[in-house]
Amino acid sequence: MKQYIIYLLFIFQIFTGQLFAKSNDDPYLGAVVTVLRKQVLAEAEWALSQQPITVTAASSSRSAGNKHDFFSEGDYWWPDPQNQQAPYIQKDGLSNPDNFVAHRWAMIRLSRIIGALASAYKITGSIKYVNHAFVHLKAWFVDAQTLMNPNLLYAQAIQGRFTGRGIGIIDTIQLMEVAQGIIVMQDAKTVNRKTLGLIKKWFADYLTWLTTHPYGKDEMNAENNHGTCWTMQVASFARLTENKALLEFCSNRYKTVLLPTQMITDGSFPRETKRTKPYGYSLFNLDAMTMLCQILSDEKENLWTFQLSDGRSIKKGIEYLYPFVVEKSLWPFQKDVMYWDNWPVAQPFLIFGAKQFKNDSWLKTWIKLDHHPQNAEVIRNLPIRNPLIWM
């Protein structure tokens, strides 16, 4: 009922011109502010009370790196019940609750903090949000005692098999709203230019690693959501560092590799639907492709309107999946082996697609869904939780 009232208020504001001044030229931005304002400001108040917690605050004896190295373990890998000393074995789609996740959750926490503070700054203009955000940014990317090394050499390790894998690069999708939050706040008058430069250098160094190390190249060439998420991250960080060559590379990769090889003519993603969590992975991959369109589209290149000769496009992908968001029981594939009941939430493809294609049905559905999920798996696979800073 609450979401329905908000939607009616939004429609009323469109027709009466009562959306506040900064959103008068963009009713969809106005809708996002109307729906999320209370949540954003509450989250920002929480963020103002938080002190930095970086990768140096926790460690695992199973990591081959040092205290500044991000470490995580493959989610679907478990001890061999026949031999506890043997290499771990895979159970696809089933997350091992005993794996080391402290660094991942520290990064998600950073993403929450920066996303909330940047959103609150965009709504209110209050410099207090910027000042506190840079306390956290300095700790993660500048201060020698607490910073994270700009690589993912030890991400998604597998006990007894690998000290790290390219597949682990997907963990830093959580840095995308950090990068976008910096873009939103970087022109504030209190921002120290030297500190800002050092933060951007960290992201530039990480981009170099992502695009040159064998792990990065492996992930770039992944033929499913991992390849999409590599490109999405590179695009996000290239936008922050103003790396035009990489932005162009990502745009071309979307058009010539990701869309042609992952989407079929009905708009679905077969590489995701054949997995043990086909619904969640389909949502996730569509969100990632949508964010590529959002990040990379400009006056020269509009990925929103790009389509292949047979009609495959981001709009086709949204149109395919949308009915199963409205009524999940219609899903034609098997149910996800875990977290089936936790999806969907307020997926980014709904709000950004609604804005781009002027589709109020997609907007209405986005309004009704959960904007503040608490399930750990959902949070991990929903890196875009603050749409305001992207609009």
Image: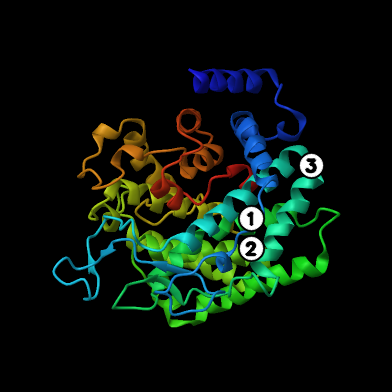
Disc marking residue 373 = none
Disc 3 designates what residue?
125
Earlier residue among tags 3 and 2: 3
Q: Tell me the element at label 1.
A: helix
Front-most of 265 and 368?
Answer: 368
Image position of 246 with respect to 119: above or below? below
Image location (x, y in percent) of residue 16: 68, 17
Question: Front-most of 389 and 66?
Answer: 66
Q: Which residue is mark 1?
A: 180
Q: Is residue 81 left or right of residue 15?
A: left
Q: Secondary structure at mark 2?
A: helix
Q: Amino acid at mark 3?
A: Gly
Give the position of the C terminus as an image quadrant.
Answer: top right
For discs 1 and 2, the disc positioned in front in the rendered view: 1
Q: Are marks 1 and 2 in contact (CB under 8 Å)?
A: yes
What is the C-alpha distance between the residues marked 3 and 2? 23 Å
Q: Residue at x 42, y 74 (%)?
A: 61
- The mark nearer the N terminus, 1 or 2, is 1
Q: Which mark is residue 239?
A: 2
Q: Residue at x 54, y 58 (%)?
A: 106
Check disc 1 and give the amino acid type: Gln
